[in-house]
Image (tube, rainbow, N blue to C red):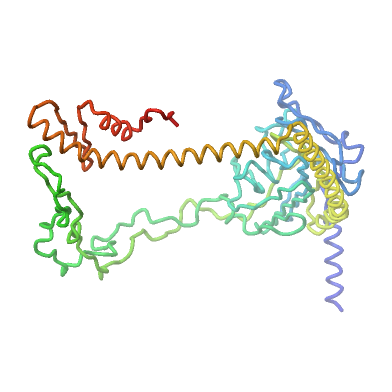
Amino acid sequence: MKFIALLALVAVFATVSAEVYFEEKFDDTWASRWTPSDWKKADGTAGEFTHTAGKWYGDAEADKGLQTGPDARFYSISADMGKTISNEGKSLVLQFSAKHEQKMDCGGGYIKLMPSTADMKTFGGDTPYSIMFGPDICGYSTKRVHVIFTYEGKNLLIKQTIPCETDELTHVYTLVVHANNTYAVLIDNVEKEAGNLEEHWDFLAAKTIKDPLAVKPADWDENARIPDVTDVKPEGHDDIPEMIKDPEAAKPADWDDEDDGEWEAPNVANPDFKGAWTQKEIDNPAYKGMWEAADVPNPEYKESTTLYKFDDMRYVGFELWQVKAGSIFDNVLVTDDVAYAAKFAEDTWGKNKAGEKEMFDAVEAEKKAVEDAESKKLEEEAKANQPAGGAAEDEEDEYDDADAAKDDAAGEADADAKDELKRRLSQEQQQQRQRAAAAGEHRIHHVMTGADRRLVLMAEEPLIIALARLLQGAPMPGRAAG
């Protein structure tokens, strides 16, 4: 009975001690609490925030938030939480919702907590902050949730990669930092990452380092494999040539040593050639692995139990750059009550998410119907504007087929003509040699190019000229070039 009473007392104490530092649902009085920054206004690149529920929503009033616009702008707006807060000795919860209605391609969607010393009139990218949290999307490579803490003047990015939501619906992002130096990141009230602050951020120097005084022992062997001394190169291994004369090659019957030169068999790969000899390797019995110095305590490391603590938080704001604008931010909450934050998310986003999804699906269906109708209309107009299109295409195909058949027939005729001319040329060569030897009326030149032997006959016979035309790809008389 005493235990139950004690639990009840603890619950009451927790409820009384819990505090909501800031809560914003963006009703019609929102402008009295939020102040646009002058940042980027002078150069004309400052965007604006519009109070709207967007194109799809579950509740037209309750789902109103601040939407970025126009495209390719910097957006900066902030609100005073009313007092400077500290999370010493308790949890800190930072929560908000984001809807990338424009199907974000590149831009930020994060929120910041700033100290009381920040100049919010010029709130921008260089304004110091305590915490930066939320989704960041750019192309295919960056789709993550940023969690950045400022510690001793440095902005520390979380080492873990937490994927963010990339669809066009509303999602709730929650960061919880506990007084025991742990944290959790939730999306739509579901934990996505959690752990120890010291392990997931580089707040402190490493606990250990490699011993700077350590020296690798002289006999330390890092060679896993060594040559096999019993493996000896075979005698005569290097005397075996890589290429040899083809033993199956035969001198052509029509080869004339006087005219063609001395005949030599071509080279072929030697089947007995084994390449460069390499000595075999074996496991090294003395191998000790790769040496590295032992770990020793890092004299620079100083343990801290207050990594979680931020003593000066006064302002909350959005400072963004977006290529394609249209994001809607809503339901901002800063509190020390984790349970209240979860309930707040369910009472706002959770209550209306089904209605938003239903409306989104209806909008998408209508959009697709319009696109399909337009596509069908264009297709019908294209058909109507093409006179006898089908018949014309069929007729053109018939002409193409006829031309292809003619080309095939001409190709076969050329091949037959070449064979016949080569046969007759062989006979003509014999006669030419006889006439040249007897009367010296003709001269024969031989051109050798590798294994290809091309005969160029300097003569006036039409037969030889015709063969030269065919071999060179020139058109035959009476047939147009194709």
Name the spot of residue 98 as percent of width and height, x first. 77, 45
* Residue 46 in view, yes or no: yes
Name the spot of residue 357 as percent of width and height, x first. 83, 51
Residue at point 36% right, 30% down?
Answer: 474
Residue at point 70% right, 38% down?
Answer: 390
206 left or right, relative to 337: left
97 left or right, relative to 451: right
The quadrant of the picture occupied by the N terminus is: bottom right
Q: How many marks?
A: 0
Q: Tell me: residue 391, above or below residue 218.
A: above
- Asked whether 395 or 271 is in front, the reply is 395
Name the spot of residue 383 as percent of width and height, x first. 75, 36
Name the quadrant containing residue 392: top right
Name the quadrant containing residue 473: top left
Q: Tell me: residue 389, above or below residue 294.
A: above
25 left or right, relative to 459: right
- Asked whether 244 or 309 is in front, the reply is 244
Residue at point 12% right, 57% down?
Answer: 238
Q: Tell me: residue 197, above or below residue 254.
A: below
* Residue 22 in view, yes or no: no
